[in-house]
Image (spheres, rainbow, N blue to C red):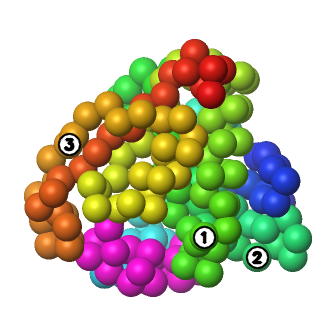
Amino acid sequence: MDIYMETERLTLRRFTLDDADLLIELDSDPAVMRYLTGGEATAPEIVRERQLPHVIAGYDTWEGRLGLFAAHERDGGAFIGWFCLRPEPDGPLDEAELGYRLRQASWGKGYATEGSRALLHKGFTQLGIRTVWAATMVVNRGSRNVMEKLGMTLADTIPTPPDMMMVEGSEHGGVRYEITGEQWEQH
């Protein structure tokens, strides 16, 4: 296992092509996909042929320092989902998106906050990240709570992308939260 980092309860590692079934299972849970696709599963061939190869290519792009990482419980090794810290494809390298998608069985245990906090710490203290942002739907209170626990502040409201208009709550739009390295130090 190519460990990227560890927290008190989690291990984050780079994805491999052998992980397709983990992502397929994660993206097939209607509750997990509620605010992304309206509960619709990602087709297995899209995960295998597009998404996973794109994730793995990102490690080369960012020299393994940034990207999307598989998260497992340290105690027992169960797959809980993923976390990401990565710049926009054509964006500056010192601005990164924070993201997470966890299995429903892992909700409510503080994993999203723990994994995200560790990525923010690494980004600001070791990777030269200046600003981290995260976005979600206005109605996704759980994700917004995580962002607020991390010290991120509401920076902007954003329109719902046209391909997400069928998602329940999409009429309320989205929100973007941000935190800078300076704000992180003070939090």
**Which structural element holds mark 2?**
loop
Q: Which mark identifies residue 53?
A: none
Q: Which residues are magenta?
A: 17-39
Residue 103, placed above or below residue 99: below
Q: Quadrant of the C terminus?
A: top right
Position of residue 112 relative to residue 104, above or below, is above
Q: Is there CB contact under 8 Å for labels 2 and 3? A: no
- Residue 158: which numbered mark, if any? 3
**Local SS, label 3:** strand
Q: Which mark is residue 108?
A: 1
Q: Which residue is mark 2?
A: 78
Q: Earlier in the sequence, mark 1 or mark 3?
A: 1
Between discs 1 and 2, the one toward the N terminus: 2
Residue visible at 20% across and 73% down in the picture: 168
Q: Is residue 8 left or right of residue 174?
A: right
Asked if one can make out residue 171 in the rendered structure from this viewpoint, the answer is yes
